[in-house]
Amino acid sequence: AQSVAQPEDQVNVAEGNPLTVKCTYSVSGNPYLFWYVQYPNRGLQFLLKYITGDNLVKGSYGFEAEFNKSQTSFHLKKPSALVSDSALYFCAVRDGRAGANNLFFGTGTRLTVIP
Amino acid sequence: DGGITQSPKYLFRKEGQNVTLSCEQNLNHDAMYWYRQDPGQGLRLIYYSQIVNDFQKGDIAEGYSVSREKKESFPLTVTSAQKNPTAFYLCASTSDSRHNEQFFGPGTRLTVL
């Protein structure tokens, strides 16, 4: 069975400080991992993904994420937070085995960057 | 929101009525998806379609129906059998590769009066 956990409903960080949004996953095969961001009353926007290769993935708007197979984690990070980063962030996983085509989403983490 | 449009943005329904939410994409994507978003529950898959004239139930298909007569279009009907339809509905699409991310529409907020 596939699942994603985002253990923090809310993350607060001061502007200019580094931010981390946590994600852990469970799949039977190799994981394909994704991060999305959602602004109020909008659809989800893709930030970055890990399929294979380098464990550190760089994405849009200065975000990056590190794939850690032993800890089954894919935490989202940014070195210096902006107020405009305040939004709802979703982690998602797809099982890499053939026939497993659907994404499973976490429950989301609301990031607030304090000026 | 890429090349995916959803309409209407807001929709109000009386109990006992069926309503249809529109989703259109011009990305030439094969696969399309419908999700429901409720506060604190993330996104839950309602239906998906990987090819024209074929679709599959997701995790919460009861009370919903879909059609896929054209590659570009994947409308969702919320029927009167759906007991708690008030939610934010998101449509997504992707090309035919499990490596590829999904592109999302702007969403439709359905409220039952």
Image: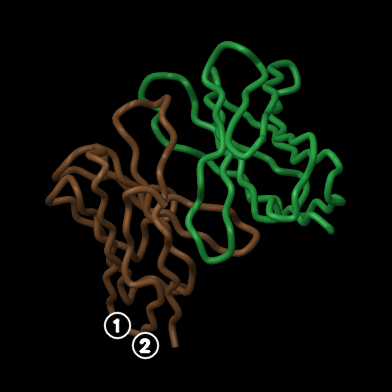
Chain colours: A green, B brown
Q: Is residue A58 left or right of residue A73?
A: left
Q: Chain of mark 2?
A: B
Seen from the viewer's position, the closer of residues A89 and A78 is A78
Question: Which type of secondary structure does the marked residue at label 2 adopt?
Answer: loop
The residue beneath circle 1 is B17
Q: Taking A41 as reference, is B69 above or below it?
A: above
Q: Position of residue A71 (x, y in %)?
A: 75, 22
Q: Position of residue B1 (x, y in %)?
A: 42, 52
On the rendered image, what quadrant is the C terminus of chain B found in?
bottom left
Residue visible at 42% across and 36% down? Answer: A102
Residue visible at 47% across and 74% down? Answer: B86
How far apart marks 1 and 2 lie (CA) works out to 6 Å
Seen from the viewer's position, the closer of residues A18 and B63 is A18
Residue A35, image quadrant: top right
Label 2, residues with CA under 10 Å away: few <14, some 14-19, many ≥20: few
The residue beneath circle 2 is B14
Question: Which type of secondary structure does the marked residue at label 1 adopt?
Answer: loop
